[in-house]
Amino acid sequence: MDELKQVFVQESGEQLDALEALLLELENRPDDETTLNGIFRAAHTIKGAAGMVEAAAVEAFAHVVENVLDRLRNHEIEVTTELAALMLACTDQLRVLVAAEAGAADKDEAQIAADSARLLERLNAYGPAGQHAAGSPRVVEPDVQRIPSPQAGHNCWHLSVRFGPDVLRQGMDPENFLRFLETVGNIRHLETLADSMPAAEVMDPELCYLGFEIALESAADKQAIEDVFAFVRDECQLAILPPNSKVGDYLELIESLPEDSLRLGEILVRVGALTADELAEGLRAQSGPAAGEMAQEARQIGEILVAQHVVQPELVAAAVAKQTQVSEKKAHDAKLIRVPADKLDHLINLVGELVIAGAATSLLSHSRRDGELIESASLLTRLVEEIRDASLQLRTVQIGETFNRFQRLVRDACKDLGKDVELLISGGETELDKSIVEKIGDPLMHLVRNSLDHGIEAPAVREAAGKNPRGSLSLNAFHDAGNIVIEVTDDGAGLNRDRILAKAIERGLVDAEAHLSDREVYDLIFAPGLSTAEQVTNLSGRGVGMDVVRRNLQALRGTINVDSQPGRGTRLTLRLPLTLAIIDGFLVVSANRSYVIPLDAVVECIERPVAEHDRNYFNLRGQVLPAVCLRESFNLPGERPTRESVVVVQYAGQRAGIVVDRLAGELQAVIKPLGAIFRHLQGIGGSTILGSGEVALILDISALIKISGQAEQRLLARPEQRSA
Amino acid sequence: MNVIRKAFHEDFTIYRVAELKPLLLDTVAEGERIELDLSGVEHMDSAGCQLLMLVKREASVAGKTLAIVAHSPAVQSLIEFYNLAAWFGDPLVVAAQ
């Protein structure tokens, strides 16, 4: 049951996402039938699933929602903005209810119940009078195709179903089960019985009195047929007789059913389960002896008949052919599998260890100078690399889903703020690690909300400024040099440089005399001092929690940059690594210590003449680039070698050289995060274990470049220090 | 003979059967021959079909004739699926393909 509930929670989550997306679409195209049907189907699926796991609260709520949706679909009520908003609120409430079912709700029960009651009251305004009782919706039928019967044989199962009185009220229409039965086999004959229906006065039209006798031609086994009725198994009386059952079994079935034996017998003949002669003989046997011996006698007749009965070989052949058809269909259905995330994490961990072990083997093979061993080790390494890429790929998801969630946010925020903003999404198919996607949601939401709140002006203001009154906010994602870049761009007023600067000076974040570039000023919005709530109003730019956003991103080894043009808009650029676990690295050595530079950042390597040793810049084919010396940055001991190397790195459009003692080639680095005590260490992104067992530190290129840049700025600001 | 002809446009679904039952039974009570025009019924589910079976039966018990003179595609489809066409005994219009 627990597992079932887990599946329920996950699937309802997906259905709710779909529901929400469709509801938003409905606002744009209120008359679209497909959308309406989709909405209804999603709500119905949630309700059905809730019924299955006995999540009564979800089921009851979804039921009322579905009632209203049904009226909407039948055009009895119109799609209005209020109704759409109400439906969205209901979607949220369903989310809460589902979470509560999983024990993960962040509200207490009383509040949830109160919310439900409030929404139900509003929903009832749209429902017809007296519609509060439970009822059943019509489900849109899945596309059912009859498999043509290859042979008119007697390869028919006989099914006898009497549906329980409450199935209709529980939203389970017998029709759906029978239609579904057609996916298991071919219904050769079906008889509908309503004999148990009482007199008109006492008949309750919402109860089900129906029963069916079905001849089903199918290659499926009994379990598969029984499974069709799994949802109503407790509610219905179901008897399944395999093909070519004994006549006695049929007679027993007739006895066990509530209807009149003679009438049932006739029906069985019509269904084709029995021939008229068999029936006549069987019934004659039954009516002959006393009641006590009746069953025994019947069985005897059945056995005699079976003895004469021969199964035709061609029927077997047909069954085999059908079975292949069915299994092909199943294979098509099984293209997706659900895997628990922790299993994948375990796999990735193992692959990480494999990478390290492979590196050790490769190192050994080189030190032994065994040609064959080297060759086999390099083949192994290549395969391990492929496994690494493939297993990391398993965890990647498209970012589009995360982006689409903002449609709702933008819509709601616009309503609240009285703005008109269009959300443009591009690059939704860009893939990145699921763990990153999960963690990027909140920072992104913050940025989007900030843009809506402070970036994009009210329509009137925009019009006065000669802009389209409808603002636009765009989310874009793409891959760049082993990173994923996410851009949040708005065409709002842009950041107000002077006011940010004034505020920063007032807060003592920067020196009043300091000359700051635009970029540095914009970066101030991430300073913790400028991020408390009351500043939002007097600071035209972004304020709330931007420092938190940046901290979150840094925890993911990501960065954020701001670009802004007054009156034209603001662009926030987020850069994130594709994965958190393994990187391709470039191994360098300084003072006999190993460091790893992410290979994606490396542009080229050059030699550095002794003459340039004391400079903190170097000349790359006429371009002057800053040089960061690892020995200096980390205060490494020992003499500098006569020949140093420079690794030219590029990060976020900036280039710099990292000066090292020597280069040691490429490697795959499994990132081991540094402990909490090293959190404030700048310039180091993590550690890894080399094949030799030695620990190497992974350099954080962006931080290194920044540190060197800051040092340079300090020198520039106080030139006298430089000469000293 | 007192012939009553009545057209229905509501859905014959679980949502409506409670309202429809008295309506249909009243209609049966009114005449000797009852003709139901269901061409405007857009949806019908098992509950609706079951209700039709009830009124058909009630009419027969009372010695009256109940005929469905026009079927909407939804009604026709379900009646055919449940193999009740012969039981209802009404001529169904077979759609020309």
Image (spheres, grey):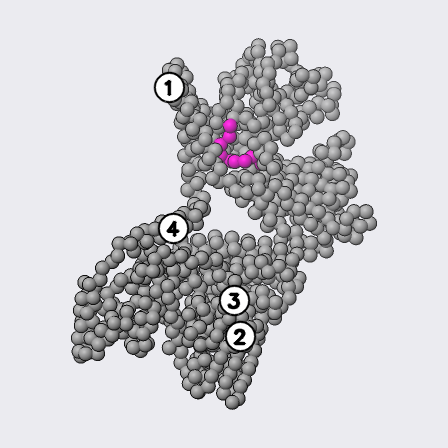
**Residue at 45% of width from left, 46% of height from top?**
A336
User: Does residue A264 appear left or right of residue A290 in this picture?
Assistant: right
Q: Quadrant of the C terminus of chain A?
A: top right
Looking at the rendered structure, which numbered label has been put on residue A325? 4
Q: In terms of image quadrants, where is residue A260?
A: bottom left
Residue A603 x, y percent position in the rendering: 60, 23
Instruction: State which region is magenta.
Output: A576-584
- Crowd rating for badge 3 (residues with CA inside 10 Å; few <14, some 14–19, many 20+): few
Residue A602, placed above or below residue A145: above
User: Does residue A185 appear left or right of residue A446 in this picture?
Assistant: left
The amino acid sitting under disc 3 is Ala
Residue at which label 1 appears: A373
| Spatial CA span between label 2 and label 1 | 85 Å
| Spatial CA span between label 2 and label 3 | 13 Å
Closer to the eye: label 2 or 3: 3
The amino acid sitting under disc 4 is Gln
Looking at the rendered structure, which numbered label has been put on residue B95? 3
The amino acid sitting under disc 1 is Leu
Q: Chain of mark 1?
A: A
**Residue at 33% of width from left, 55% of height from top?**
A219
**Residue at 32% of width from left, 53% of height from top?**
A318
Magenta stretch holds residue A577:
yes
Residue A177, placed above or below residue A480: below
- Tell me whether circle 3 and circle 1 mark residues in contact (CB < 8 Å): no
Residue at which label 2 appears: B70
> Of residues A373 and A248, which is closer to you in this image?
A248
Q: Is residue A87 visible?
A: yes
